[in-house]
Image: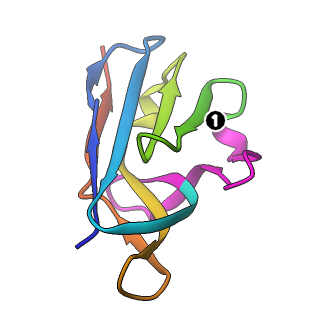
Amino acid sequence: QVQLVESGGGLVQPGGSLRLSCAASGSILSIYDMGWYRQAPGKQRELVASIFSVGSTYYADSVKGRFTISRDNAQKSVYLQMNSLKPEDTAVYYCNAVITPISGWKNNYWGQGTQVTVSS
């Protein structure tokens, strides 16, 4: 069974930094695109950043220049370095990955979410 487990959320003051981590575990054959989404109260889940299997990246306009996504294929992990955090970055952040398990089909997997709160 494939799982994604996030860590690194918390409470931070405006202008501060946090680093989110997400590790995939289970019987995994291949990991393709990985990314981070977020959902604020009363809003739809939105894509924050993606990193593709070839290493190219995508960022939402709202986080460009402040957030950096990276991955470690050997560790089956994806990271999100968040700098210059703003109150509007407050949300539950979800890890996402496209994975082919050893026995099964390519599928889209989600982590359980980690809360990020930016407040003074």
For the point 37% across and 36% down, the residue is 21
Image-based side of 110 in relation to 5, left or right: right
Q: Residues within 10 Å of mark 1 (few under 14, many from 20)?
A: some
Read off the magenta span: 35-63
Residue 9: x and y in percent read 28, 32
Q: How many marks?
A: 1
Q: Nearer the viewer, residue 9 or 85?
A: 9
- Front-most of 67 and 105? 105
Q: Is residue 48 above or below residue 43?
A: above
Q: Nearer the viewer, residue 73 or 56?
A: 73
In the image, is residue 100 above or below residue 105?
above
Query: Residue 56: x, y in percent?
Result: 77, 46
Find residue 116 and report its horizontal and vertical position in percent. 31, 35
SS label for mark 1: helix
Q: Quadrant of residue 11?
A: top left
Q: Does the magenta run of residues contain 16?
A: no
What residue type is disc 1 on? Val
**What is the quadrant of residue 59 in the picture?**
top right
Residue at image mark 1? 63
Asked which colour scheme the image uses, the reply is rainbow
| Image spot of residue 112 (x, y percent) | 23, 58
- Does residue 65 appear left or right of residue 42 in this picture? right
Q: Would you say residue 54 sits in the magenta stretch? A: yes
Q: Quadrant of the C terminus?
A: top left
The quadrant the N terminus occupies is: bottom left
Q: Residue at x 66, y 39 (%)?
A: 62
Q: Residue at x 43, y 47 (%)?
A: 76
Taking the image as shown, residue 102 lies to the left or right of residue 52, namely left
Name which residue lies at 44% across and 15% down: 17
